[in-house]
Image (cartoon, helix red, strand yellow):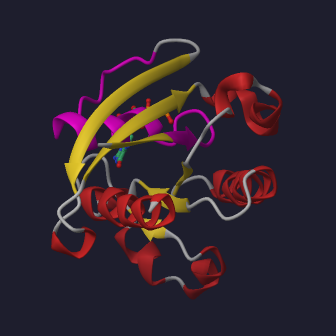
């Protein structure tokens, strides 16, 4: 089975841990408190007929958001296959941070898949239609309702699988 280390990056509170738990356990707990540092969660996904029914093991590295761009100076990124970079639709500064993290990841790991995620879309559903965001080519998700989450992971899984072949 192909296994892929996938980094979850983005400011504190944007919903990285909630997205990981929605994906792995199909649950949302608003009172959940993250541990300090890094959590690692593993989840196997059947990629379907278009990927020869391969199974991909996601090894999700959920970093504490305090690193900022200094995350690229740490050992945590060693061997990363892809990154999921998350912003919070209710906090514009996190969108700016998402763009700089995406650039940083692409510079360090040219060609490796990056998914830009605008999370908490349940709090601002009209935002998905906002053309000013189109520059990010972002995917809209809600860890709370589950909107877009499985699709985002599946599509990233396909991109990882195509590169690993
Ligand atoms: P992290 O620091 O990036 O890992 O963020 P968390 O996953 O800990 O989430 C931060 C806060 O935002 C928590 O109170 C979550 O319950 C809440 N949250 C996360 N995702 C969503 C979402 O999609 N919608 C809403 N309404 N709240 C969310």
Q: Quadrant of residue 65?
A: top right
- Percent position (x, y) of residue 9? 59, 41
Residue placed farthest to the top in the image?
36
Q: Quadrant of residue 66?
A: top right
Give the answer, above or below, for where 164 lies relative to 11: below
Judge left or right: residue 59 versus residue 115.
Answer: left
Q: In percent of the image, x 29 and y 63: which residue is there? A: 148
Residue placed farthest to the bottom in the image?
131
Q: In percent of the image, x 52 and y 35: which residue is there? A: 13
Quarter of the figure with the N terminus:
top left
Quarter of the figure with the C terminus:
bottom left
Is residue 31 one of those drawn in magenta?
yes
- The reply to whether residue 145 is in sight is no
Q: In percent of the image, x 46 and y 39: which residue is there? A: 16
Ligand 1 appears in which quadrant? top left
- Percent position (x, y) of residue 28? 23, 36
- Percent position (x, y) of residue 23? 26, 44
Provide the residue span drawn in magenta. Answer: 6-34
Residue placed farthest to the front in the image?
165
- The reply to whether residue 38 is in sight is yes
Give the answer, above or below, for where 61 lies relative to 80: above
- Percent position (x, y) of residue 41? 36, 27
Give the answer, above or below, for where 70 lies relative to 152: above
Judge left or right: residue 163 versus residue 46.
Answer: right
């Amino acid at each position: 089975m192909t296994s892929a280390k996938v980094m979850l990056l983005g400011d504190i509170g944007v919903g990285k841990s909630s997205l990981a738990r929605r994906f792995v356990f199909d649950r949302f707990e608003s009172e959940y408190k993250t541990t300090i540092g890094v959590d690692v969660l593993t989840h196997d996904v059947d990629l379907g007929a278009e990927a020869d029914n391969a199974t991909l093991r996601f090894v999700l590295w959920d970093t504490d958001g305090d690193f900022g761009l200094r995350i690229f100076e740490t050992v945590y990124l060693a061997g990363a296959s892809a990154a999921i970079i998350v912003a919070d639709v209710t906090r514009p500064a996190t969108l700016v941070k998402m763009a700089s993290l995406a650039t940083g990841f692409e510079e360090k790991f040219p060609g490796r898949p990056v998914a830009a995620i605008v999370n908490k879309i349940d709090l601002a559903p009209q935002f998905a239609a906002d053309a000013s965001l189109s520059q990010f080519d972002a995917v809209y998700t809600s860890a709370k309702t589950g909107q877009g989450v499985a699709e985002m992971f599946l599509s990233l899984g396909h991109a990882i699988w195509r590169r690993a072949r």
